Amino acid sequence: MSKILIDEPEPRKEKVAIVGAGLVGCLAALSFARLGYKVTLYEYRDDPRNETTVDRNLRSINLAVSDRGIRALNAVDLEMSIRVLKNILPMRGRMIHDVDGHQTSMKYGLHNEAINSIDRAYLNIELLNELDRHKNIKVNYGLKLMKMDFSGKNGNPRIYFEKTKKVANTLEENAIRTFEYNFVIGADGAYSATRFQLQKFVRMDFSQEYMDCCYIELYIPPGASKKYKFQLHPNRLHIWPRNKFMLIALPNFDGSFTSTFFGPWDLTESLDTREKVIDFFQTNFKDAVDLIGLEQVVEAFLTHPKCSLVCTSCFPYNYKGKCIIVGDAAHSMVPFYGQGMNCGFEDVRVLVELVKKHEYELESAFNEYSVTRQQDLDAIITLARNNYTEMSHNVNTTRYAVRKKMDAAMHLIFGDKWLPLYTMVSFRGDIRYSDCIKRSKVQGWLLSQLELGVYGLGAWLAFKAIRAVVRDR
Ligand SMILES: Cc1cc2nc3c(=O)[nH]c(=O)nc-3n(C[C@H](O)[C@H](O)[C@H](O)COP(=O)(O)OP(=O)(O)OC[C@H]3O[C@@H](n4cnc5c(N)ncnc54)[C@H](O)[C@@H]3O)c2cc1C
């Protein structure tokens, strides 16, 4: 694609390198280009738009884009946001599938709010296409960050890349290339090399925890009917909750659903023969098997990769005004709140606001980012972890349904002064993650008091009735 089309802002003389052209790296590139910086992106994979790029099917993931992600895209450029999100499918609630195949719909919000399903690889490609429209953005594929130090002019970062084998075809294969920039943004994912390098210069707290849960991708094809291609409700996130494990499915535009099995490693690895897989799926997910196809379930379960889920957190996220990490590089979380990418996009929006607030004085902007962002990132990592129990177990319980109704009723009565937690996290990007937790704790306590009051009143009325009956005997 030829470069252009975007009105470039007043150019700045500083140059920034962004490591990783995933979702967050692309948005960071667009945002910093909009601020006038000269941006170079380094990505160790090949360009995914090349026909020869290795098949990505087995790890195709559908993401739920929600308010925080959309706000961050809008903040860069509304038209760009509309272009990249043109193929989203709104999901207005959960559809719970019980073992007998009965389905129960639970709306996410009282005002028809939706989270939106989109294929991760597709969204990445749309964002890469947007990069091509800017003349102050350059993308280098096939270069893997190996090392970083701050030995450049004025303590500037020097970054060292290795040409990755897959795309290396010259005598220079694996030769280290060195570049110097004014600053570096690391957006290279959960196993970030930028973060690893940064730890040599910053007293960074870091923790990494693997969850005892793995996931396997499955696929529900479109239905046979030409008129109506969806085999399930297209505007729901489908969940088959079975306590310790679950299946979910998110809709695609072509009528198919990307489905994911989540379960403990021991259980998943024990299902290692055709017979065991068939028995397990027929017992627990009979209606899903009818949609996926028995042979397809067996094939997927025995051959698709079993992927792990890792939570990482660290602090601080920057070294002076010279390097900062965003997205999964700074905080990878389990996917159960559908917030990993949304939060990574929000990182970029918050960072850009601070750069503007500090009038491009990067050290103060980056320092303030680290200090203020930490509590929000810790909050969403905790929320995401807790939501596994909500999705795989709580949604099946009567108490959960009753409390949801009470929560919704309070919202109806008190409006914005009472917002259910899910609403705050997914539909109200103007509320900080840390405030979502604070508000929800108070509301939770009040709901418990109300529950006690209701049970107390019930018990008192029951007692009065019993006494009246007994007296009249
Ligand atoms: C099953 C599952 C479901 C999910 N569902 C949702 C959801 O519904 N909603 C949501 O918001 N989030 C969801 N997420 C999380 C979301 O996928 C991630 O948060 C998001 O992809 C992170 O983007 P990123 O750009 O920070 O990192 P990545 O997507 O990991 O991108 C990092 C990039 O850096 C490149 N790279 C890595 N190392 C180097 C190096 N040394 N040199 C150069 N380049 C390098 C990689 O090739 C990659 O392109 C889900 C995740 C999973 C696993």
Image (tube, rainbow, N blue to C red):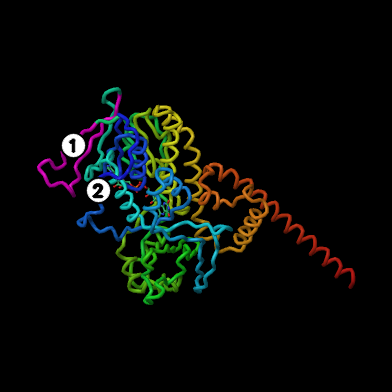
Q: Amino acid at mark 2?
A: Arg
- Residue extending furthest right? 472
Q: Is residue 195 visible?
A: no
The x and y percentages for residue 87 are: 38, 59
The x and y percentages for residue 410 are: 66, 54
Find out if the beta carbon at label 2 lies less than 8 Å from the nearest ligand 1 atom.
yes
- Residue at horizontal 39 percent and vertical 72 percent from the top: 229
- Residue extending furthest top? 154
Quadrant assignment for the C terminus: bottom right
Quadrant in the picture for residue 200: top left
Toward the viewer: 389 or 168? Answer: 168
Q: Range of the magenta residues?
A: 155-179
Q: Earlier in the sequence, mark 2 or mark 1?
A: 2
Disc on res. 176: 1
Q: Amino acid at mark 1?
A: Ile
The alpha-carbon separation of the residues under discs 2 and 1 comes to 16 Å
- Residue extending furthest left? 171
Is disc 2 placed on a helix, strand or loop? loop
Structural crowding at the residue carrying mark 1, measured as other residues with C-alpha within 10 Å and reported as few (<14), some (14–19) or many (≥20): some
Q: Which numbered mark, 2 or 1, is in the foreground of this view?
A: 2
